[in-house]
Every structure is written in C-alpha cells, then in structure tokens.
Image (cartoon, rainbow, N blue to C red):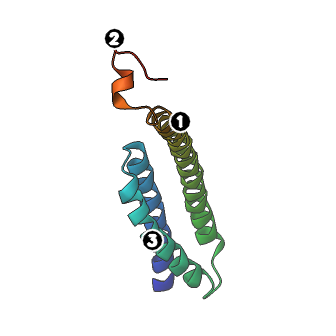
Amino acid sequence: MEHYQQLLSAYQQIHTLSEQMITQALAGQWDTLIEMETTYILAVEKTAQLVGISELSPTLQEILRSKLQQILNNETELKRLMQLRMDELTVLIGQSTRQSEVNSTYGQFHDRALLLGEPQAR
C-alpha cells in the first residue's frame, strides 16, 4: 500500500509542478520556468521507475490515468505558451537585425553629413 501512496504522490508532484510552470509562463517568468524544468524532469524519471515496480489495481490505474491526463493537458498548454514566447522572440530578433542593418548602413556616413543644413561632401 505504501508503494501506491508513493506513486500517487509522485504523479501529484508532477501535476503540481506542471501547474506552477504554466503560472510562471503566464507571468512571463521564463528564467524561473526553465529552472523548474529540471525538477520536473527528475520527478517524471522518478515516477517512471515507480510505475515499473509492481502491478496496479484497476482503481489506482483509473486514478493515475486521470492525473496523467491532467498532466498531459498542462504540457500541451505549456507548449502553446512557449510557442507564443518563441514567436515573440523571433519578431524581436528580426527587429534587432533590421535595426542593426540600418545602423550599419547609415553608420558609414560621416556624422556631420547627416546634420541638417550642412552641405554633404560628394
């Protein structure tokens, strides 16, 4: 019976971590989310080891199946939020690249040539 409690507790820990990771993503706390990812992966690995130890009763299988579905739903949501962030970063990188190109192009001119009212050397 203790093994079943450990298994249920392990699934609950994964679920809780996945909920916390979604909260961090929604708050824009990406660094914290990345730090939590290591704990999440370790919890999943530990749980996988516990599952292989013994046969599970149909009742416990149903409880764990429900918890696993919640975890998978959270992972889907987290992936969606992370994709949105990746899209934002792609736009920012594109803007930065374009700005750098503009700066490089106009940086070739002498500063005085860009001042209004002064003749430009040809």
Residue that numbered label 2 is attached to: 117
Cα–Cα span, label 3 and label 2: 60 Å
Picture residue at 58% right of the left edge, 79% below the top: 48
Along the viewing direction, whichever of 87 and 34 lies nearer the viewer:
87
Q: Is residue 3 above or below residue 18?
A: below
Residue that numbered label 3 is attached to: 38
Q: Residue 68 carries which label?
A: none
- Residue 4 seen in the figure: no
Q: Pointer 1: residues within 10 angstroms few (<14), some, or many (20+)?
A: few
Q: Earlier in the sequence, mark 1 or mark 2?
A: 1
Q: Which residue lies furthest to the bottom in this view?
A: 53
Q: Is residue 27 above or below residue 61?
A: above
**Given the image, on which type of amino acid does mark 2 rest?**
Gly
Q: Is residue 110 left or right of residue 71?
A: left
Q: Where is residue 25 in the image (x, y as percent from the top left)?
A: 43, 48
Residue that numbered label 1 is attached to: 98
